[in-house]
Amino acid sequence: MRNIKIYIFTISLSVLVVGCHLFESTKVSSKEIKAASTWSEKDQSPTFSECESIEDAEDKKICFESTISNSILDFIDQNPLESSESISEEISVVIIIDKEGYFSLDEIERSRKMDSAIPNLEEQLVSAINMIPKAEPAIKTNVGTFVSTKIVLPIMIVAD
């Protein structure tokens, strides 16, 4: 009986010692994480279904940007902005395309003069961006997952 206990103890100890490598943790440095997270040319930018068949990357980008611009312009044509004063200014609209391909407004870079001239500008832009059709989201290819992206859209506003 004593031999069996020693035998079981020896086997248990052996399994424990051999199996310890399963509990080792691997540290990944923040530098490696940042390198893997940085956008590369291999990663796939967001796109619309009508742009997917385009082979040239630059033409595909132009198609994507044109679809966004045309959607916003169509909304503004149907819902004109009204200004209380003459203004000519370029604003920058930061748009988020989430992991599911939906668009939302992140921020608008504009002057105080623009805020006073067109007080409902942000509301109008939020509505316009919400009307952009759903896109195919960006893909981070080294991990094979959809990711959120941001784009900056410059818009020239001229009111006489």
Image (cartoon, helix red, strand yellow):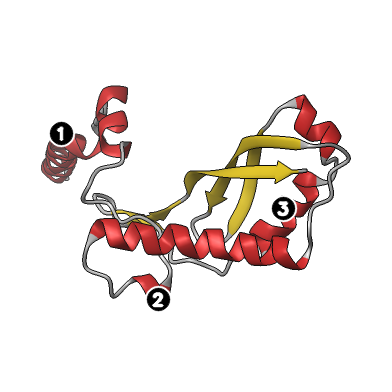
Residue type (three-letter) at the residue carrying disc 2 = Glu
Q: Secondary structure at mark 2?
A: helix
Q: Residue furthest front?
A: 160
For marks 1 and 2 on the same chain, the one whose residue lies earlier in the sequence: 1
Q: Which residue is mark 1?
A: 17
Can residue 44 be seen by looking at this rendering? Answer: yes
**CA–CA distance in space, label 1 to label 2:** 58 Å
The tag on residue 126 is 3
Residue 66: percent from left, percent from top: 46, 61
Please tell me whether mark 1 or mark 2 is closer to you in this view.
2
Judge by depth and name the residue closer to the eye, 131 or 76.
76
For marks 3 and 1 on the same chain, the one whose residue lies earlier in the sequence: 1
Looking at the rendered image, the quarter that the N terminus falls into is top left
For marks 3 and 2 on the same chain, the one whose residue lies earlier in the sequence: 2
Position of residue 142 in the picture relative to residue 119 (left or right): left
**CA–CA distance in space, label 3 to label 2:** 24 Å
Q: Which residue is mark 2?
A: 50
Residue 20: percent from left, percent from top: 20, 34
